[in-house]
Amino acid sequence: MLGALRDGAPRRIGPYEVLARLGAGGMGEVYLARLDTSGEFFAVKTVRRDFAGDPAFRDRFRREIRVAGLVRSAHAAAPVGGDADAEVPWLATAYIAGPSLAQAVRRSGPLPVPAVRALGARIARALADLHAGGVLHRDLKPGNVMLAVDGPRLIDFGIARAHGATTMTATGLMVGTPAFMSPEHVAGARKVTAASDVFCLGSLLCYAATGEDPFGDGPLAAVLYRVSQADADLERVPEELREVIGACLSADPADRPAPEALVELLGGERQAPPWPVPVREHIGEYGTELAQLVAAGGPLLEVPATAPVVTSGPPGLHFAPTLAPTGPTVPPTPPKRRRRALLAGVLALAVLGGGLGAYLLWPEPETPRKPVAAGPKAPAGPHVTGVDDQGLADASGVVPQNAAQRPAGWKPWRAKLSEPAFGCSGNERVLVCRTTGGRYEALDPADGKRLWGARPSVQPDSEESFVGPTGGIFLAQEAARPIVHDGLVVLAFGDVVQVRDARTGAVKWEKPAWAQQGEGSRPVVADGMVFVAAPTAQDQTNDIENVSVFAYTLADGRKLWTKTLTNGDLARSEYRDFEPVAYAKGIVYALSDGGIIAYDAKTGAVRGQVEQDARSCEEIKVFGAYAYCVDVSHSAGTAERAHLLDSTTLAPRKSLPMPPTGVDPAFVTERVAAGVVRESGALKVFDPRDGKELGSYAAKAAPAGLSQAMSAPLLAGDQVVYADYASLYTVRIGKDGKPTGLRVTPVPGAPGARVDQDPANPSSGVTYREMLRTPDLIPVGGLAYLVYDQGVVASVELPR
């Protein structure tokens, strides 16, 4: 829990304001800090002054900072900066408001089997991410795993080192914690490998499942001997876990499963860990404690011996009145004022979409609490697996922002792809774009440097995307938009679907299944599954392919099920982009010739289908218990309507008024939606319940003779975000769900307005390379990645 700052403790470390003390180790102190007055909190580790005076130690610490910068994982506390040359060297990582696994087990006892499986799968994924970056953890133990609402986080890479580097410890110094070492640790630090981390994970899971150290207690020499022989006592480990933990604890490193395989052996990452009630309550105390600190308005300071002691805080909170830096003690806030201040601090954090909202809105096991009705809901557990122009897999256009997903070492950057792009997806690990030539290019989100490229070349004569003279769309290599999902990238082109490693581009698996649909077509990826459209037969009468939806496991491409979307009796004028269109809460939605259908994602069983009056909907946006769609008219005089549907059965809840004229909704929540007017590019914010306009923001006019194009808006945290060729635009959504003003941020390196090519070419159509196309906007971790149609890419910070 949080501790008060002692006399002489720093008030600032680098750019961070110090708020409280988190603890201490042999090397120095660890503090809770924040960046100015933002809602983002960090753990900042400092070095003792006697160590800081040693040049060799500074060199080792400098390497530690570099190693931390290699770590990018959704299940590890993200490093955000450090300075080995400061007077007091420091390293900052994301702060995880929760107990360590060791604290949780000591207080509440062993975890149930489902929680151990989920815990292990996520830590295995974190190890896979570390190893992919060339980093070993080397001290995996219960004290280095923090438990948060949405899952565990691996911390403390202080004795990690890159593959091939010399040890970061002094010669002969044993690295690791005896009860959670591997045989290679005992043999010598230079013998430690990636398999050693897996052995330590086996020990950690044994502890989580039994509450006991796997190699017993007693004299240190006896414990180390049992470790060196891999002589673990697994008798008390539940039978369901014994085999997989035993495999991790194999004496021969070659017999231990790789972290990627271990993820699947433990059940994958399909749902948040089902923490038992005592652990949830334990985690909640940290959230409450953090809210108390925010409400106090300043750092947590030691109370002088003569000062009154405040005891109204939660258990374990050493709460003290806030002191001015050099002034007298401020009296405690009266109870009513303090309660209002606490509530204000809590609401502010919830609206910011940070972790605290997750603690406050976490549902009970069987009776979920109603969401706070104060504007767009702050999502619980705001980890983002990947973002494209529709937001997340639910296509709602709502993208939570999580500062922990900011790449280590990020600074604003500008890059150039090898050719124009249209269709991108990204997260903190990779930004991948489809080019007009049917290729894929991957950039590092931290600095814009090229990571890898993929050139399908399955159709040698298909090297350019274009719109034909009659309006038909022809995509080079029949390439779909890419989808980034955690550490993987899913591509579909030609007649295959392919999964690659996000950082290296290495192919994990490939299956012969893909049917080119439209420009916006993409695989749908969620909860360890991939859903794609693929041809199953061809009607020889009208040369139209019948299409089915195929479901595969993301880990290895195993086919789960397939369902037919068309019946073969369609006229060409009736053909649509029949394909999966969204995913939410275990349901995948696909467009069939009978309208949108909801399938159980694991079995393919039909859960629901739209009724006749909503069969003209071709896309769907899912939010909570509802789904929203708008008719698409293919004939003159057809009345259009917006529909609110049950998100499971697709039964109609009500028929809604249309959005403002000319607006295609880009994001939808229960209280606010927005889209860009097709003709003018103006942003319209409206209430989806009644179609009433809440705000209108005109597009900035382009200079004479030049043209602009506006991206589709997304709801990033609590602000609407969209862009043109010169600037980033943000409109904050207030607590009442209403927009509160427009902010224009110029984007350095943006190409600016340009001359539009004449698309009217009756003989050959127009290529995508020549077309004026909207920018791609990817908001992740408080940053915006902007991909312009001529291949320029820029990354800037979202306004706060």
Image (cartoon, grey):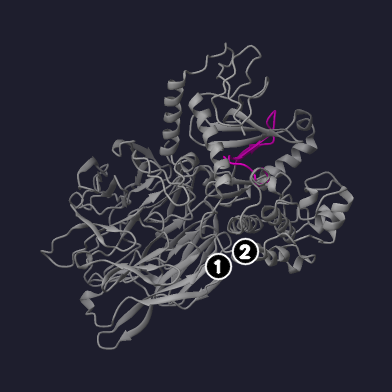
Which residue is pictured at 49% across the width and 29% down the height? 37
Q: Residue 533 location, x and y as percent?
A: 38, 73
Which residue is pictured at 80% across the width and 38% down the height? 56
Contact? badges 1 and 2 (CB < 8 Å): yes
Question: Vertically, is 129 above or below 247?
Answer: above
Name the foreground residue: 24 vs 371.
371
Q: Residue 604 location, x and y as percent?
A: 41, 72
Question: Vertically, is 92 above or below 324?
Answer: below
Which residue is pictured at 41% across the width and 76% down the height? 562
Tag 2 secondary structure = helix
Q: Is residue 463 visible?
A: no
Q: Amino acid at mark 1?
A: Ala
Image quadrant in which the N terminus is located: top right
Question: Vertically, is 526 above or below 108?
Answer: below
- The span from disc 1 to disc 2 (Cα, nearest Å) is 8 Å
Q: Residues within 10 Å of mark 1 (few under 14, many from 20)?
A: some
> Which picture quadrant has residue 324?
top right
Total number of numbered labels? 2
Q: Residue 299 location, x and y as percent?
A: 57, 24
Q: Earlier in the sequence, mark 1 or mark 2?
A: 2
Q: Is residue 239 visible?
A: yes
Residue 407 tag number: none
Query: Is 102 within the magenta?
Result: yes
Q: Amino acid at mark 2?
A: Glu
Name the foreground residue: 224 vs 442.
224
Q: Residue 229 location, x and y as percent?
A: 84, 61
Q: Residues within 10 Å of mark 2 (few under 14, many from 20)?
A: some
Which residue is pictured at 58% across the width and 67% down the height? 506
Q: Which residues are magenta?
A: 80-103
Instruction: Find disc 2 in the rendering and name its residue.
Output: 260
Instruction: Find disc 1 in the rendering and name its residue.
Output: 555
